[in-house]
Amino acid sequence: AYRADEEYDYLFKVVLIGDAGVGKTNLLSRFARDEFSFETKSTIGVEIWDTAGQDRYRAITSAYYRGSVGALVVFDLSRRVTFENTARWLQELRSHTDPNIVVMLVGNKADLRHIRAVSVEEAQAFARKEKAFFTETSALESINVADAFTGVLTQIYHVVG
Ligand code: GDP
């Protein structure tokens, strides 16, 4: 778990899910190094849970999802099966969380342009169907990573008011 600040006006729990190897750990470490401030009004505590290395321990599933108000559902743009599996991750997420949870579908490894296996249009259409937002990132080249996290937080912030 990563907590940006011990003193905050809001604390939002955001979970990172997706197949092993899609880049969850690297997205989180890339994001965590950057400062995140939300205008100047409020300090937002961000508690991000990462399943890294724990995918097999299904007993922790409920605890992992409990109380989360946002989720990044990550796949690897160069491995089609990881995109197809996001349907299962979304199903698990929905069965453990509030219907109003803010979901961002994240196509990571956008830098691997030459071996891309999922088109923007297809991913966008799927996200729309799932009432999720969609973005593409590269943890390696530091593209769009902060926007993926802040996009979720912005939506949560608006929902919470
Ligand atoms: P996790 O299992 O989902 O937490 O995935 P990791 O963050 O451990 O990353 C799995 C592998 O993908 C590692 O070898 C990373 O270096 C690599 N990786 C992660 N993000 C990117 C990215 O944006 N681009 C590329 N090319 N490789 C990445």
Image (cartoon, helix red, strand yellow):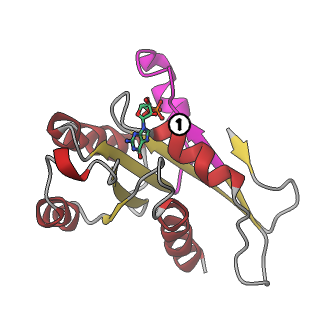
* Element at label 1: helix
Q: Is residue 13 left or right of residue 74?
A: right
Q: Compare residues 115 and 97 and report the one nearer the observer.
A: 115
Residue sitting nearer the eye, 81 or 103:
81
Q: Position of residue 88 (x, y in %)?
A: 23, 37
Q: Residue at x 79, y 70 (%)?
A: 43
Say whether residue 10 is magenta. Answer: no
Q: Mark 1: few, some, or many residues within 10 Å (few <14, many ≥20)?
A: some
Q: Nearer the viewer, residue 96 or 144?
A: 144
Question: Percent x, y for residue 82?
Answer: 23, 37
Residue at (80, 69) in percent of width and height: 9
Q: Is residue 67 above or below residue 22?
A: below
How many marks on residues? Answer: 1
- Asked whether residue 49 is drawn in magenta, I would say yes
Question: Which quadrant would the N terminus be assigned to in this image?
Answer: top right
Report whether 111 appears left or right of 49.
left
Q: As drawn, which residue projects farthest toward the right?
A: 7
Q: Nearer the viewer, residue 133 or 93?
A: 133
- Whole-percent x, y for residue 154 in the image: 54, 74
The image quadrant where one finds ligand 1 is top left
Residue drawn where x is 43% and y is 54% of the image: 98
Instruction: List the single residue furthest toward the front.
Output: 114
Relative to 150, say whether 15 is above or below: above
Question: Which amino acid, mark 1?
Answer: Thr
The answer to whether the residue bearing label 1 lies less than 8 angstroms from the nearest atom of ligand 1 is: yes
**Residue at the disc numbered 1:** 25
- What's the magenta region? 47-69
Name the image quarter holding residue 93.
top left
Residue depicted at x 67% and y 51%: 32
Q: Position of residue 114 (x, y in %)?
A: 19, 49
Tell me: residue 53, above or below residue 72. above
Image quadrant of residue 161? bottom right
